[in-house]
Image (cartoon, rainbow, N blue to C red):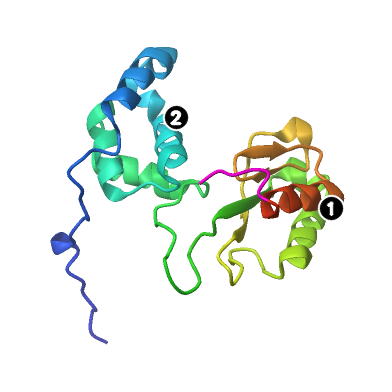
Amino acid sequence: MAWITKNSGATQIPRRPEPYLTTAMKERLSRDIVPRYEVKQGALLPVLHDLQHAYGWIPYQALEEAAAFLGLQPADVWDTASFYEEFWLQPRATSGTPPRGEHVIAVCRSIACEVCDHSAITSAVREKLGIDVGETTDDGRFTLVELECLGLCEGAPAALVDEEMVMCATPESIGKAIDALAAGNHSHH
């Protein structure tokens, strides 16, 4: 059996002239976020969240900019961003079924949420949207994911509808949150 090789070293990273991590973002992060950590590198997750909030995903160029800002190796920033399921490292597609919909419904599947029947929440979303976990509706509006832990254990079962927390979720409350998005009452990206 032959080894299949790929030319990873020649991968081209799409670039744009203006930075993703803007001067204003760096100033705010330096003033409000970085001082909370013993070392500058501790602010990596908040920096990644800021980037994703601003653009709806985190491009490779932005990962490199975050690395430079925090004094980290780009590979370490990539490892972190790719480890956490809530970070999107691909943009929405413009045609076909997108890798991520306009709105993301994320149901927590941690042990606390499992004990409190997170599967009923996931099932309600599946039924309402006609998609399975990891899928996006045909119109590109909604994606359903399950995440390992949202850190909202006191409100189990918990979910995120875009960036809005739904704590002590029920099939009814998650349905209402989806209806509100569908009606355009909450707009994120």
Name, please, the residue furthest toward the front. 184
Q: Is residue 108 above or below residue 11?
A: above
The residue under the point 22% across, 32% down is 68
- Residue placed most toward the observer, 16 or 4: 16
Amino acid type, mark 1: Pro
Local SS, label 1:
helix
Report if the CB atoms under discs 1 and 2 are less than 8 Å apart: no
Q: For numbered disc 2, what is the local secondary structure?
A: helix
Residue 71 visible in the picture: no
Residue 104 image point, x, y percent: 59, 52
Q: Amino acid at mark 2?
A: Pro
Depth check: 108 or 61 in front?
61
Q: Residue furthest left?
A: 10
Q: Quadrant of the N terminus?
A: bottom left
Q: Which residue is mark 1?
A: 171
Determine the image quadrant of residue 182. bottom right
Is 168 displayed left or right of 70 in the figure? right
Query: As drawn, is 172 to the left or to the right of 158?
Result: right
In-front residue for pair 187/114: 187
Q: Which residue is mark 2?
A: 46
Numbered mark located on residue 157 in the image: none
Q: Is residue 28 something one can see in this rendering? A: yes
Mark 2 packing: few (<14 Cα in 10 Å), some, or many (20+)?
few
Numbered range of the magenta stretch:
184-189
Helix, strand or loop: magenta stretch: loop
Which residue does the image show at 70% across and 52% down from the upper left? 183
Q: Residue 50 location in percent, x, y?
A: 43, 33
Q: Residue at image x 17%, y 68%?
A: 7
Q: Which of disc 2 and disc 1 is earlier in sequence?
A: 2
